[in-house]
Image (cartoon, rainbow, N blue to C red):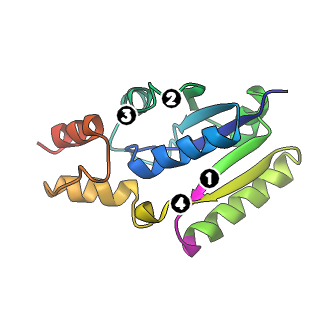
Amino acid sequence: MERVVIYPGTFDPVTFGHLDVIERALELFDRVIVAVATKPGKKPLFPLEERLELLKKCVSKMKRVEVEPFSGLLVDYAKRKNARVLIRGLRELSDFEAEFQQATINRKLAPGIETVFVVTNPKFFYLNSTMVKEIASMHGKIECFVPKLVEAALRKKFA
C-alpha cells in the first residue's frame, strides 16, 4: 500500500524551511502532497494561483511530490486523497502547542488520520513566512531564506 502524506499550509511564500520538511517527508513516505490552503479568513500576500506556481517550480525536481490547492477541512481532503498521515514541521515550543491542538482536533474528526511532527532543521528554527515578507517589504536581504524565484516574486511585490 502506498504511503501518502499531506503537508498542509498557506506557503505565503514558500521558504527553505518548508522545502526542508518536504525533502524529509520524501525520506519517510512514498508520495508527498503539498496542500496549499485557500484560508478565506487570511489575507495572503500572494494569491492562491501564484503560491501554487511558486511551489510547483520549487519542487519541480523532487519526484513523488504533488502540489494542490485545498479548502475545507483538512481531514476531509486527506480522506479524498487516501492519505492517512499529515506532516507538520516544528520550530519551537509555541509551534507545538498550536500544532498539538490541531492534531488533536483532526484525530477527533477523523480517528484514522495521524499527524507526524518533524523537528525543523536547526538552521531554519527562526524562519517563517511572516518574517520573510516583513524583511522583503523593507528591501532587506532574503536570499538566505527563500529560493531565487521566490525572492524575485517578493521583490516584485514590494518594488
Looking at this rendering, what residue extends furthest in the bottom direction?
93
Which range is magenta? 88-94
Could you tell which of marks 3 and 1 lies nearer the N-terminus? 3
Residue annotated with mark 3: 47
Residue annotated with mark 2: 62
Disc 4 versus disc 3: distance between alpha carbons?
Answer: 26 Å
Circle 3 or circle 1, nearest the eye? 1
Name the residue at 40% across, 58% down.
128
Determine the image quadrant of residue 68: top right
Amino acid at pointer 2: Met
Residue annotated with mark 1: 88
Circle 3 or circle 2, nearest the eye? 2
| 32 w.r.t. 14: above or below | above
Place of residue 36 in the rendered image (x, y in percent of width and height, measured from the top left): 53, 36
Looking at this rendering, what residue extends furthest in the front direction?
27
Circle 2 or circle 1, nearest the eye? 2
Residue annotated with mark 4: 120
Determine the image quadrant of residue 25: top right
Asked if disc 4 and disc 2 are in contact, CB closer than 8 Å, the reply is no
